[in-house]
């Protein structure tokens, strides 16, 4: 299925910018309580992950 041009352009733009977010993402997920987004909202307030993250 062919995507509209704007979808491909959006994907290209996000893929180009993705390396700029790797270090921040790794730090957020390595903390005692993982955080989301550039504001560091703790997952225990968002509730997207299961309580037990072992394994």
Image: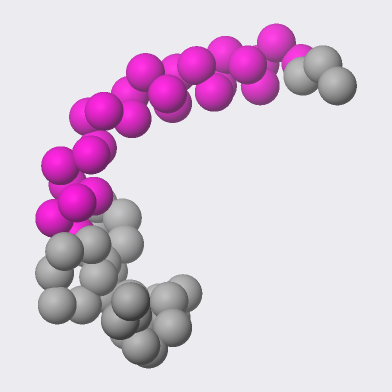
Count the numbered circles shown.
0
Q: State the residue at coordinates (13%, 55%).
A: 27
Q: Is residue 24 above or below residue 37?
A: above
Residue 10 is inside the magenta segment: yes
Query: On the picture, is 46 further left or further right than 1?
Result: left
Q: Quadrant of residue 39?
A: bottom left
Q: Is residue 50 above or below residue 31?
A: below
Residue 24 is inside the magenta segment: yes
Query: On the picture, is 32 further left or further right than 49?
Result: left
Question: In the picture, which quadrant includes the N terminus?
Answer: top right
Q: Quadrant of residue 46?
A: bottom left
Q: Is residue 36 above or below residue 20?
A: below
Q: State the residue at coordinates (46%, 74%).
A: 48
Question: Residue 33 appears at what percent x and percent y?
Answer: 21, 77
Q: Is residue 33 or residue 6 the one in the foreground?
A: 33
Q: State the residue at coordinates (37%, 18%).
A: 16
What is the span of residues highlighted in magenta in the rendered image? Answer: 4-28
Q: Residue furthest bottom?
A: 51
């Amino acid at each position: 299925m062919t995507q509209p041009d704007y979808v491909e352009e959006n994907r290209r733009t996000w893929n180009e910018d993705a390396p700029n977010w790797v270090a921040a993402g790794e730090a957020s997920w390595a903390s005692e309580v993982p955080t989301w987004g550039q504001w560091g909202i703790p997952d225990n307030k968002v509730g997207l992950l299961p309580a037990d993250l072992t394994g």
